[in-house]
Amino acid sequence: MQFGLLYEMQRPYDDEIDWYMLYQETLEQCELADQVGFDNLWFVEHHFLYGFSGSPCPEVMFGALSQRTKNIRIGFGVSILPNHHPVRIAERAAMVDQLTNGRVEFGTGRSNAYEQIGQGIDPRETRDRWDEAIRMIPQIWQTSGEFSWEGDFWNVPPRRVLPQPYQKPHPRMYLACTQTESFRLAAQRGIGVLSSASYAVDILANHVKVYRDAIKDADPVGAEVNDFWGNNVHSFCAKDDQAAKELCAESMKTFFGPDKPYIAGRIGAYEELLEAWGGVPEHLKADFGRWLRQSDEEHQSQAAEAGISLDSGPGAARAAVAQLDANTLADRGVIIAGNPESCIKTIKTYEDIGVDQVMLILQTETIPHDKVMESIELYGNEVIPAFRNGGNGK
């Protein structure tokens, strides 16, 4: 099992966000992760998500990290291909690869309608734009002479694209995936998965199987098939087992809060989350189970009788998500949290279903810098060693 850190670079909604301190703290956390044995750093590309993500151009952070880290691999998690000319993306990633002596991992994605429309990108075109770009970029990296391209979205006359990557034939490529269709698409293109949704482990196991089966018939866009599965998951490790689980659960629920732009604009978002997190647990079914099986009109009527308002938001599913307790989320593997022993136990379940790396979301708007540093150090001292040098996570 490998260990990564995934960064949104969060701060809560505040007109007085201290951007300087945010970036300095992030660099400090990444340096510590490198020192204690983490395998990867992953940085998102997000735009306009004020109060959620301060990472619009991760390659700038990578420039700093290339000089402040020595061993840890640095991942685009992800580069939004439809937003940029593929030549520019290929140049940026290759330059970071040179600066890091070949430590780049190249994740890709399409983002969401909120961000796409804000940049003049038609959401209906993004699937095809991504597909054309993912075929162009590895060819750019492998062409030592002049590269040229004639496509539906981009045309490049013969040009020498500089630089080429340090890694040969090129960095490993990935697709950020949230649903079965995306897992199959990644497999078809012969690229790895960066699973960017939260799942209970027993539900995630089915998605991993779909991918593993499909990639056997891959038609790779790159020089080689990459069958690596990285799975992002909210995490927090501390000596106090229950307190760590409670803080992590709060962190994840805030992350998926109704005030977030990508949640507010999605129909059925909380129904999807509830299903992915394993559904309504037994101890809540008396309160929520019957509403989730009935029509919206019946939900409203019965909720009114019970004195519960479902007028705003996705109703019963949103309420059920809010009521999922920290221990249930930890037991299902939706979060990796608790003391080192608890974290090791949960990570072993990920390993058992074929996940190659847990991409831990530690730094969020609800977990301050000092606690993130403590958690990173505890991971390095007690959790990661359980999976190294013959350790089996037990």
Image (spheres, helix red, strand yellow):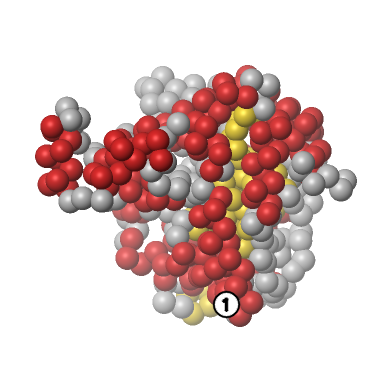
Number of labelled discs?
Answer: 1
Image position, residue 337 (x, y; %): 60, 33
Question: What residue is at 64 percent from the left and 50 percent from the top?
Answer: 350
213 over 369 or under it: above or below: below
> Can residue 151 be seen at all in this image of the molecule?
yes
239 over 35 or under it: above or below: above
- Is 171 left or right of 318, judged from the image as shown? right
- Is 4 left or right of 205, judged from the image as shown? right
Nearest to the observer: residue 163 or residue 382: 382
Nearest to the observer: residue 365 or residue 49: 365
Question: What residue is at 58 percent from the left and 23 percent from the top?
Answer: 242
Question: What residue is at 14 percent from the left and 46 percent from the top?
Answer: 298
Residue 229 figure quarter: bottom right
Nearest to the observer: residue 8 or residue 159: 8
Question: What residue is at 31 percent from the left and 38 percent from the top?
Answer: 286
Nearest to the observer: residue 166 or residue 283: 283
- Is 281 left or right of 375, judged from the image as shown? left
What's under tag 1, amino acid-wise? Ser
Image position, residue 8 (x, y; %): 52, 38
163 over 16 or under it: above or below: below
Image quadrant occupied by the C terminus: top right
> Can residue 22 be seen at all in this image of the molecule?
no
Image position, residue 392 (x, y; %): 80, 46
Q: Label 1 crowding class (10 Å Cα cut-off): few <14, some 14-19, many 20+?
A: some
Residue that protrudes farthest toward the right in the picture? 389
Q: Tag 1, which secondary structure?
A: strand
Pointer 1: what residue?
A: 148
Residue 175 figure quarter: bottom right
Image position, residue 23 (x, y; %): 58, 29
